[in-house]
Amino acid sequence: MDRKIVISSLLQHVQVGLVEDGRLVEYYLESDVQDRLMNNIYKGRVENVLPGMDAAFVDIGLSKNAFLFLADLPDEQAARKLRSGDSLLVQVVKEAEGAKGPRVTTHITLPGRFVVLLPSQNSVGISRQISCEDERTRLKELAEELKPEGMGLIVRTMAEGAEKEELKEDLDALLQEWSRIQRKFRSKGSGPLIYRDHDLIYRILRDLYDPEQTEIIVDTKALQNRVQRELDDLDLPSSQAELYEGKLNIFTYMGLDKDLERARSPRVWLDCGGYLVFAQTEALHTIDVNTGRFVGGADLQDTVLTTNLEAAGEIARQLRLRNIGGIVIIDFVHMMREADRELVLARLAESLGADKTRTKLYGFTRLGLVELTRRKAKRPLAQMLEVECPLCRGTGRVDSDPTTALAAARAVRAAAAEDDVPAVLVRCHPAVAAQLIGPGGKYLELLEKETGKPVFVRGDEDLPKGEYEISCGTAEALERRALPVMVGDRLEVQILEPHARNRRSGLARLHGYAIECLDCSALVGQTVEVEVVEVYRTSAVARLAENQN
């Protein structure tokens, strides 16, 4: 497998891409000004205990209290009642999200390159990525021998083939770090933050870099020097990281930007012509597989199988790249043959095997859906790169023009019902303004007749389609604000179509405001300069300027 770690630095951001066989499979982004909480260790103080939820809120010095499940307490602490004011050593296992604070545990983990130290758990585990049974047995025996009394160890994937001395050096460094953490926790003068996790570049090199299989590419000399220093600190053999000096951004040059864009889209096309559709709810993620443009050969079930097999591999890659965690439901194209379902499950399991994040595949349900779970290890790609749309409030949909116009008309009614309101002005997008005004001002006249008050409408392209603003005042003041032109104004406008009532005239619009351009019906599609000669509430009349070519 061709494997690359691509590191780019721009402004205050560092972005890292893990590339396998030319495809982006994992993406990381970190900012110098962004406070990352994950894996940080704090001296926390219990604020309040929630017996009904078997949980507690813990103050760790942040704006929001952290959430602790009582099941995450050590046995000796759980044996006695947890009380408000108790001090705890806690580690962040889930970042703050929305209105929720971070989630913490008292089961501390300290990762090294070859092993993870578990100070409060007396156990030994071997990475599932190590498949050779003889190697697993060898590493487990070494871990049992090296493990400190009463503590636990997890042997990481990078330890495959490592010697006992390498594991011991890694473990000794972690034990020294654990001693420093304990001393700081016991110190009365220490602040809440006891231990800050390493930055992105260090973590990537520690966790993902394999000198024999991985190439490192950077886009600045400073990054090249930084990577070399970190590799030296990690005592890793390496050739110098390759320095990319092209004019294009390295992610653009390598085509990784396109992979990122695909991962941010709900629809992902497959090479065969089928496609995947990703959707998310509060409870779970769903992935729908469709044959799309793929018609295959003569046998429908062979076409379905080909689509589903390719989909299985792409789904595994997208789960890693999008960093989707929690419950995932996959709706493959329906397969009639049991053997086909087994082939697709096997392909999915094989593809998920490359994912270091813990994933459990449950198989097909009675409804023919595939269930799996994936541990929430870091922020999803969508949260990393996007914010909730302020217009649609995260739904992906906004009110249609007629719906917005109806809402604006109701607001006009409510405002005009007040005795001290002489007139009303609506500011809205031009498309919404057209719905309010109607053909020849018909709807606006009806609204004025119903309210008994002058109503003015001003189109404004800077206002989003789903929004509008209501103003009240005198008719004279609001009319001046509503009219976008005055007699004598010279404008450059595009003739959109012949005028509906005067076929010799052309129709132009300015922020939705209709302008009848005299003798311009033959100029449709052209941009001309006109002079305004008449102004009305919903439209104006203009003629070609005298110097018009």
Image (cartoon, helix red, strand yellow):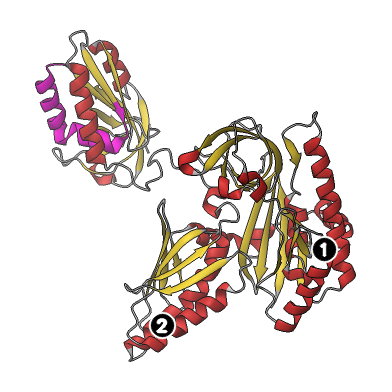
Task: Tell me where residue 43 sits by quadrant.
Answer: top right
Answer whether residue 239 is visible to the viewer in this image. no
Answer whether residue 149 is visible to the viewer in this image. yes
Where residue 408 appears, as percent x and y from the top left, is 24, 29
- As drawn, is 61 to the left or to the right of 479? right
Tell me, for residue 71, which label it has, or none. Answer: none
* Residue at the spot of label 2: 341
Where residue 497 appears, as percent x and y from the top left, is 24, 45
Mark toward the viewer: 1 or 2: 2
Instruction: In the displayed orientation, state which residue is furthest to the front.
Output: 79
- Depth check: 498 or 138 in front? 138
Image quadrant containing the C terminus: top left
Residue drawn at (22%, 11%) of the image: 421
Where residue 316 appears, as percent x and y from the top left, is 53, 70
- Depth check: 145 or 155 in front? 145
Image quadrant containing the N terminus: bottom right
Task: Tell me where residue 542 sits by quadrant.
Answer: top left
Mark closest to the chain's N terminus, 1 or 2 = 1
* Disc 2 packing (10 Å; few <14; some 14–19; many ≥20): many
Residue drawn at (52%, 69%) of the image: 360
* Residue at the spot of label 1: 241
* Vertical position of residue 185 compared to residue 257: above or below: above
Inspect the image, locate mark 1, and give the three-letter code of the amino acid beneath it.
Ala
* Vertical position of residue 456 compared to residue 133: above or below: above
Magenta-highlighted stretch: main secondary structure?
helix
Magenta segment range? 427-453
Residue drawn at (57%, 51%) of the image: 379
Inspect the image, locate mark 2, and give the three-letter code of the amino acid beneath it.
Arg
